[in-house]
Image (tube, rainbow, N blue to C red):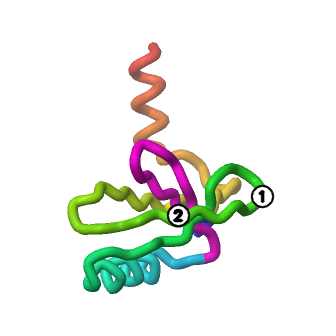
Amino acid sequence: MKRIDIYYGGDHYSVGGRRLEDLRAEVEAGLEGGIYWLEVNDGEGQMRAAHLLLSPGVALAVVPVPDEDPGSAPDQDWSEGIARASG
């Protein structure tokens, strides 16, 4: 996995070098205490730590971003559908 994108309070953050399952377990365990500070990366490129205050009812989206596989070809059904739609 390339990284995990985090959407919180209308802003975008990320977490790198983590497994989705581990991050979810960390958040769930932290919320068992009522509130939890999650450390994330703020900004693109160079790491700049930010801490998000999590509590029950606070919206948090966790989106895994897979590694890109440059050798993979598009699904044939998908590409045929594009050709039919444009032709």
Q: Secondary structure at mark 1?
A: loop
Residue furthest to the top: 87
Residue 33 covered by magenta stretch:
no
Q: Amino acid at mark 2?
A: Ile
Decide: is 47 above or below 83.
Answer: below
Q: Position of residue 47 (x, y in %)?
A: 73, 62
Residue bounds of the magenta highlight: 4-17
Decide: is 34 above or below 8.
Answer: below
Say whether residue 23 is left or right of residue 65: left
Residue 14 covered by magenta stretch:
yes
Report the magenta stretch's main SS.
strand
Number of other residues with Cα within 10 Å of mark 1, as a class: few under 14, some 14 to 19, many 20 or more: few
Would you name the residue on which mark 1 appears? Answer: 46
Would you name the residue on which mark 2 appears? Answer: 4
**Quadrant of image for the N terminus:** bottom right
Q: CA distance from mark 1 to mark 2?
A: 16 Å
Kindly indicate the quadrant of the structure image that contains residue 35: bottom left
Question: 38 or 75, which is in the foreground?
Answer: 38
Number of other residues with Cα within 10 Å of mark 2, as a class: few under 14, some 14 to 19, many 20 or more: many
Nearer to us of marks 1 and 2 is 1
Kindly indicate the quadrant of the structure image that contains residue 14: bottom right
Question: 33 or 67, which is in the foreground?
Answer: 33
First in sequence: mark 1 vs mark 2: 2
Residue plotted at (44% across, 52% down): 7
Q: How many marks?
A: 2
Question: 55 or 66, which is in the foreground?
Answer: 55
Q: Position of residue 12 (x, y in %)?
A: 52, 48
Labels 1 & 2 near each other (Cβ < 8 A):
no
